[in-house]
Image (cartoon, rainbow, N blue to C red):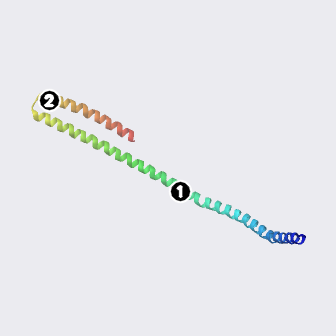
Amino acid sequence: MPTATKAAQNGAAATDAAVAPVTETVAAALSQTSTVAGDVITRTTEAFSPIVQSTAGTAQELISGFAATVKTVAGLTVDAYHQAIKQQLDFSIELADAMHVDWVSELTRHNAKSIGDLVAISAGAAHNLLK
């Protein structure tokens, strides 16, 4: 049995001797890989940083432009609403006048003026908020 043990020890020593250079080579390769990976990350970050900053600036410009367009459309909507109310009030006055009842015409004109004034004030306030 001592011969078998000695042979096993010699085999283990031979294996260790054969594995040692491979281990050193793998360790050196991993070290170089880490250095290369760090360099790749650094260069990639340096390359993409201006692109990301430029994109952020472009996005801000698009958002600002979109907000301005929304304000413009909202202002036009307020104007259209104001005009529609004016037309509806004018029509109600025409109908009241067509009845040939003085108090109905007078009451309708008075109400139309009050409602028209309120709508004009509301539209003006909406335009001020959109500025």
Q: Residue at x 23, y 32 (%)?
A: 113
Which label belongs to residue 104? Answer: 2
- Position of residue 22 relative to residue 116, above or below, is below
* Other-residue count near label 1 (Cα within 10 Å), few / some / many at <14 / 14–19 / ≥20: few
- 68 left or right of 8 in image: left
- 115 left or right of 39 in image: left
Q: Residue at x 38, y 45 (%)?
A: 71
Q: Residue at x 48, y 53 (%)?
A: 59
Name the secondary structure under disc 2: helix
Rendering coords of residue 114 (x, y %): 25, 31
Between 44 and 71, the one nearer to me in the picture: 44
Q: Residue at x 47, y 52 (%)?
A: 61
Q: Quadrant of residue 102?
A: top left
Between 28 and 82, the one nearer to me in the picture: 28
Q: Quadrant of residue 115?
A: top left
* Other-residue count near label 2 (Cα within 10 Å), few / some / many at <14 / 14–19 / ≥20: some
Between 110 and 37, the one nearer to me in the picture: 37
Going by the picture, which residue comes out furthest to the left?
A: 100
Type of amino acid at the residue the image marks with label 1: Ser
